[in-house]
Amino acid sequence: MKFALSADDRPVLLAEVPAPLLDAEMLGRTLARLLFVCDLLLDESLVWLHPGARKVPPMPGPSRQAALLDRHADALAELAAAVAALAEPAPG
């Protein structure tokens, strides 16, 4: 995954998958990972997504992506562990 700027200078999150590896399973896993990263960045993205809001509004209902995230929980657990490791304070 990587971040880039669109033609009109909006930040975008991209994922690249080599064509020979792209199948339904890889596409689902890639979408789940993109959603996970978006969730991680939700608070920092508040000013773009909800201008003027002080906090992220509650979701009006259950996530429509819940089944996708559940299906790829193993890949997301690995990503979550990596994120948690980055967030740990340095020893000393």
Image (cartoon, grey):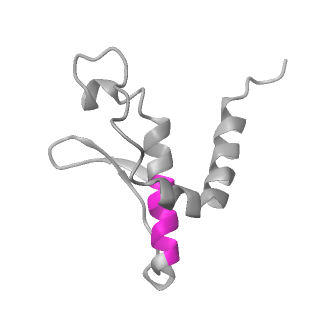
Q: Farthest residue toward the front? A: 61
Q: Position of residue 20 (x, y in %)?
A: 48, 85
Q: Residue at x 68, y 53 (%)?
A: 78
Examine the residues drawn in magenta and state their main secondary structure: helix
Image height of 42 relative to 91, above or below: below
Q: Farthest residue toward the bottom? A: 20
Image height of 86 relative to 15, above or below: above
Find out whether residue 26 is within the magenta segment. yes
Asked if residue 83 lies left or right of residue 14, the reply is right
Q: Farthest residue toward the left? A: 8
Q: Which residues are magenta?
A: 25-34
Quick one: quadrant of the C terminus? top right
Q: How many marks?
A: 0
Q: Is residue 1 visible?
A: no
Q: Position of residue 18 (x, y in %)?
A: 46, 76
Asked if residue 30 lies left or right of residue 51, the reply is right
Between 57 and 86, the one lying in front of the other is: 57
Asked if residue 47 lies left or right of residue 23, the reply is left
Find out whether residue 10 is within the magenta segment. no
